[in-house]
Image (cartoon, rainbow, N blue to C red):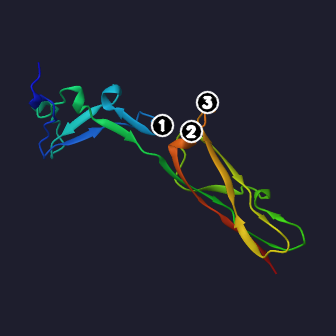
Amino acid sequence: MFDEGDFYVVKPPDVTVHLDLSGLWLTDVGSIPLSALSAVPLTVTDPAGEDAKAQNRWRFVGEEEDPVLTVEPRKLEVASKSISKVNHGQSLNGWETLSPAWISYGTLAKGHTIEIEVTGVLLPRASATENTIASVKIYDASGTEVTQNYAISLRPGILQWIG
C-alpha cells in the first residue's frame, strides 16, 4: 500500500527530462496519458548530459501522477490570391486562376491533404472586392476529415480592376 507521499514526482532542479516523441504521429487534438504511450523513450540527464535515471532521483508512482501529453491544434493560415486585371466587362472570379489559394503559414501534418474553396467575385461595375475563402477542409491519408485538429485563420486576397 502506498502512503500519500508516494503520489507525487520527485524532481531535483538540476536534472532535465527528455521525451522522444519523434516516432509518434499524434495529430488528433486532445490529451493522452504518457503511460498509454509505451513506445516513448524517457531520458533523464544531469547538467553534464549524463544519464540520471540510475540515480533513483525520479519517482513516477501511482496513476494520479501520470504525465499527460497534450496535442494542441496545429496553426495554419490559408490565403487566397490577389488578382488585378483590366476590366473587359466580364466578372473576375478568384477561383479561375491557377492555384487560387495556398497555405501562407504553418504546415499540414504528414499524410494530410487540404481542400480550399475560393469564392471571390468582382463584378464589372465594382472597382475591388475581397477574394473570399468559403471553406477549408483537411483530410488524413485514409480520407477522414481532420479539420478540427487545426486552428485555421483565413487571409483573403483582393480582386481589383486596373487601367
Which residue is depicted at the point 11% across and 34% down?
A: 57
Left or right: 36 as drawn, with respect to 53: right
Left or right: 133 as drawn, with respect to 91: left
> Which label's residue is closer to the chain start, 2 or 1?
1
Q: Mark 3 points at which residue?
A: 142
Which residue is depicted at the point 47% across and 46% down?
A: 73
Q: In this view, does 162 lie above or below 114?
A: below
Q: Mark 1 points at which residue?
A: 28
Residue type at tag 2: Val
Measuring from the top left, give residue 24's x and y in whole percent.
42, 33
Q: Please identify the quarter of the rendering in which residue 8 is found.
A: top left
Q: Please identify the quarter of the rendering in which residue 118 is found.
A: bottom right
Q: Tell me the crowding category of disc 1: few under 14, some 14 to 19, or many 20 or more residues within 10 angstroms, Cα based.
A: some
Residue type at tag 1: Asp
Residue type at tag 3: Ser
Q: Which residue lies furthest to the right in this view?
A: 89
Describe the element under mark 2 as helix, strand or loop.
loop
Q: Name the residue under label 2.
A: 146
Q: In this view, does 85 lie above or below 48?
A: below
Q: Which residue lies furthest to the top in this view?
A: 1
How far, Cα to Cα, is label 1 from label 3? 14 Å
Which residue is depicted at the point 38% across and 36% down?
A: 31
Marks 3 and 2: in contact by CB < 8 Å? no
Measuring from the top left, give residue 10's x and y in whole percent.
13, 37
Q: Tell me the crowding category of disc 2: few under 14, some 14 to 19, or many 20 or more residues within 10 angstroms, Cα based.
A: some
Q: Is residue 108 above or below residue 128?
A: above
> Which label's residue is closer to the chain start, 1 or 3?
1
Disc ID at residue 89: none
Left or right: 90 as drawn, with respect to 2: right
**Mark 2, mark 3: which one is toward the viewer?**
2
Marks 1 and 2: in contact by CB < 8 Å? yes
